[in-house]
Image (cartoon, grey):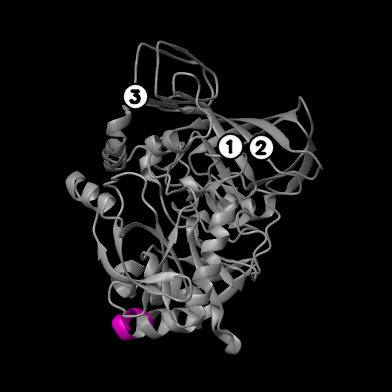
Amino acid sequence: MKPVILAGGTGSRLWPKSRAALPKQFLRLTSQFTMLQETYFRLLGLPMEAPLFICNEEHRFLLAEQVRQGDISHGGIILEPMGKNTAPAIALAALRATENGQDSVLLVLAADHLIADQQSFHQAIAKAEILAEQGKLVTFGVVPNCAHTGYGYIRKGEALGAGAQGYEVAQFVEKPDQVTAQSYLDNGAYLWNSGMFMFKASRYLEELKKFSPEMFEVCQQAIATETLDLDFIRIDADVFARCPSDSIDYAVMEKTDAAAVVPLDAGWSDVGSWSSLWETASQKDANGNVVVGDAILEQVSNSYINAEQRLISVIGLDDVVVVETKDAVMVAHKDKVENIKKVVDKLKAEKRSEFQFHREVFRPWGSYDSIDNGERFQVKRITVKPGEKLSVQMHHHRAEHWIVVSGTASVTRDNETFLVTENESTYIPLGAIHALENPGKIPLELIEIQSGGYLGEDDIVRFSDRYGRTSDKKDPA
């Protein structure tokens, strides 16, 4: 079995924690590990090959770093030049899994789901693998515990295999209204559509070619262009841009006569909203509150409070969600958290940075935190990991002062290279070609003060970069 872990979502309904540059699969929301790491760790103990990861180009270093931190062995990280939904992403993985005459059974998982009962999850996987070996395209249907209107449903058909390993899929149905959802729950033949799948790579490709031949053809051409860049598997952007965009449900599963479903009763959630995090939390106080971080509550019940940096005080409220980050606070009634997406859409339309970035931004070399700014200045706290180096670059519109707080910096400024140690500083004039490197064994911490007429992150001319980034607005710093 070869896991394929899809890590391309944006998780906008979990704003302000989840942002375009740091979506929910890369966040620690339910444990000390990120959602992506948890997705891999819950597979441990199963006989499996090293997993394939698939993510967007802009998230590649986030994924690589979390794989490194989790000591996760993998079979490569496929980079999508642009999002085309799940069907093409899975096709790329299936094509790669059939190279050199191989034909693995693929276990396709989203990187941002919660599954509380690992043993029951493994048992469902074992049942699905039997059906997949028989040529079935298997989806996992979650046994519903309420009349949920936020999920699509699957109606079970005839039982398959000895002891009912699974069922034929009688029907896929869209997200229902409340009355219809209650009828599905009462009927007992309906399961939530989890978005997890298992099938032989060749069988998926056969069905994709049958029902979406253009998608199959473009993906085949794209994977033929693959090049290796460190752990990353790159494909030609111009070729992949021609690929139709569609989900695996619409492109294949709703059309094939080989669809099967295995019931899953393992404490599953897609963690699609702040209210779902409250619902799935294992620890609530005596009043039904979930508290993360520093908070003082008075006459509050059945609420979710998440404080990142400051003290939050909530008084006399029930059924609310309060989430604080370094640069934003979100307050909502638990029943209205689905409307957070409308706030995110407004942020995007107004081109506000809070749509894409946190105040602290992570880069392959470390991170920077924009702690203060004004009309012609900006102050950042910069952390550079041991042995890492920022690109050799220059700025047209700003000068920079660097003050080392801890560690040692190797500074290149035009034609000279020198060391700056704790409590020392240096100056980078406007137009100077410069670079910053941490030659030590501990993190380098420094304060950067920028001054000038324009302080945007896109004011960078990059001359060389060990991470293969280019001088454009999509890939700054």
Camera-nearest residue between 187 and 239: 187
What is the CA distance from the residue labelled 2 to the residue labelled 1? Answer: 6 Å
What is the CA distance from the residue labelled 1 to the residue labelled 3? Answer: 35 Å
Q: Residues within 10 Å of mark 2 (few under 14, many from 20)?
A: many
Badge 1 element: strand
Residue 263 seen in render: yes
Label number found at residue 383: 2
Q: Earlier in the sequence, mark 1 or mark 3?
A: 3
Residue extending farthest front? 163
Q: Which residue is mark 1?
A: 368
Res 228 quadrant in image: bottom right
Badge 2 element: strand
Find out whether residue 78 is within the magenta segment: no
Q: Are marks 2 and 1 in contact (CB under 8 Å)?
A: yes
- Residue type for callout 3: Asp
Query: As drawn, is 202 to the left or to the right of 403?
Result: left
Camera-nearest residue between 50 and 157: 157
Which quadrant of the rendered structure holds the N terminus? bottom right
Find out whether residue 213 is within the magenta segment: yes
Q: Earlier in the sequence, mark 2 or mark 1?
A: 1
The part of the chain drawn in magenta is: 210-216
- Residue type for callout 2: Thr
What is the CA distance from the residue labelled 2 to the residue labelled 3? Answer: 39 Å
Residue 210 is situated, as x and y percent measured from the top left of the image, at 32, 86
Q: Which residue is mark 3?
A: 319
